[in-house]
Amino acid sequence: MLGKGASFTRTLGFRLGMLLSIAILPIGMISILQTLHLSREAERSSEIAIQGRTAAAAAGERALLQGAIGTADALGSSVLTLLGDPAACSEMMRDFVQRSATFVYAGFTDTTGRNACSSADGVVDLGNSPHFLQFMREPGTLITASANGRASGQSVVIVSQPLYREQDLLGYVAVSLSHDLLRSTHATAYWSDGARILTFNSAGQSLVGDFESDNDPAAILPKGMTLDALIPLTDTTFSGISNSGEQRVFSVVAVVPDLVYALGSWSPQLTGIAGLTVSRLAAVLFPVALWAVSLAVAYFAVYRLVLRHVRELRSQMRRFALGNRDAPPPILEGAPGEIRDVSETFHNMARILIRDEAAMEEVVAEKTVLLKEVHHRVKNNLQLIASIINMQGRMIDDTDAKRVLRSVQDRVASLATIYKNLYQAEHLDSVEADRLIRDIIGQMSTATVVNDQSIQIDTQLDPLVLLPDQAVPLTLLTTEAFTNALKYAGKAEGQERAWVRVQLRVDDEGNAVLTIENSLGQPLNSLEGTGLGSQLIEAFAMQLDTETEVTATDDVFTLHMRFTPDTHHSLREPEERRVVLTSAAREGAQH
């Protein structure tokens, strides 16, 4: 797998894609950065706009609450002058509430919780009310909500201011605003079914809100957060999941600093932030799409202009290298000029090679015919000489002369057989030595009879291809040795017939080994000979750059020879030769 991957990285298409990717990368990065920057700016503008819309929606409520705080301060001065006359103080409070269309209650509560000066009838004990208890824990300006006010009996928001005489805390002056009045001040132009607003105090108590049901603000709050946890997020905008499971955009602004805050809950579609998410995604997808389209167009262009012509030219070269040379490959007419020039050059080169190879084949064929004719004529002349010797032998009565002439005739016949194999061979530069030796042994064994009894001849000849320079001396040496074996073969004691064995093999080291054995009917020292055969054997062995080894026992005579064959231009080498193309015959390639 690694090799295939490395091969793929060397292709023109891959390298072009890498270079094009590097070229497009800066443009893509700039596009992404600019789009993200614009998206962040747009998001920031949207957040500021949402905060402004939330603040604008609570503007009416802010005015009422700030007015209530100022009113409580102003009433405190009057209370100090009328504190000794509770009836007059209460009458003043009732007159104030009747003249005001804003407040539903006004009164003074002392530090014991008694409400003797108020717009309500009678004295009201507020000692256990949540507002009084919270004020006593932290005296100061306080804004709370009550679903059923003790004094007014209505759903109100209570705004109180502490009342001091010099350094002594006397109590607090409180005024109440109805929830309906405060809710009606929400700017309806900023709201729809996808928007909600909720005001709450610094203690995390909800004051006024646009609730869908049961006056429960929990549904519009961010999931897992309480109102007091939102106070640190003042003047911020964030997205999240509400307790109702909706994706919302939340904004927190201060209505009355450090006292009252407003939470705006918005649908993402109303704020435009949902579109910003899509724009961020597009900021990444657009450069990626541009890169993919550029690669596709570039690869298609390179394939149409370069790759398909290069592949066709490669196929032509492969077919030509594998021997398909009936005609020069066609020129790629539709290719670009540079590739067409290469194709035309290859076409001309192939045409010249085909022409030169045809001329060389004609010359080689002519020389082969002439050489075979020479071998054929030499064979005929040798056979003619052998026939003349045979005729001369018939005219001589001397037995020794007949034997000498027969020996010469056998040698000449062996040479004739060699040249017969040479001109019949398909390749003149190599000879099948095993076949040549088999023919000579067959020719000599059929014409030889010793003591009117046939001799058993066994041969074991392994295939061996040699150059003529080695095949000729090997064959002549085998002829002499075989002739001697036939001449001196005798029936050993206990055997029915005399025998001769000829073995030609190739050992594990690649050396050729020739072994000729014959049986002996009488001791070797009792046999007489001229010694000419032994001299010829030694001479032929020298031509093969080796020596013969002779061993003899009472029953067997053995001649053994080992030499190194020269098969560099042998007949069987092309069968094992592999064709390697310039593409290194890649795996999976088809030709």
Image (cartoon, rainbow, N blue to C red):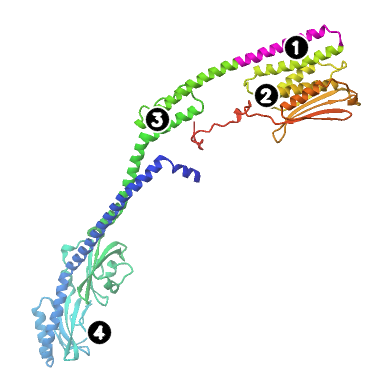
| Mark 3: amino acid | Val
* Residue pointed to by mark 3: 342
How far apart are labels 4 and 3 at the CA level?
A: 97 Å
Q: Residue furthest top?
A: 395
Upstream in sequence: badge 4 or badge 2: 4
What SS does tag 2 mark? helix
For the magenta stretch, what is the residue range? Answer: 370-398
Badge 4 or badge 1: first in the primary sequence = 4
Query: Where is mark 1, residue-wise?
Result: 386
**Residue annotated with mark 4:** 138
Residues at discs 4 and 2 in contact (Cβ within 8 Å): no
Camera-near label (4 vs 3) is 3
The amino acid type found where label 2 is placed reads Asp
Amino acid under disc 1:
Ala
The residue beneath circle 2 is 469
User: Which secondary structure type mostly characterizes the magenta part of the structure?
Assistant: helix
x then y, percent, for residue 20: 35, 45
Q: In the visual, does 573 lie left or right of 298?
A: right
Counting residues from the start of the chain, the first of labels 4 and 3 encountered is 4
Q: How far across and down, in percent of the image, does residue 223 sit? A: 32, 67
Of residue 130 and residue 173, the one placed in the foreground of this image is 173
Upstream in the sequence, badge 3 or badge 1?
3
Q: Nearer the viewer, residue 531 or 108?
A: 531
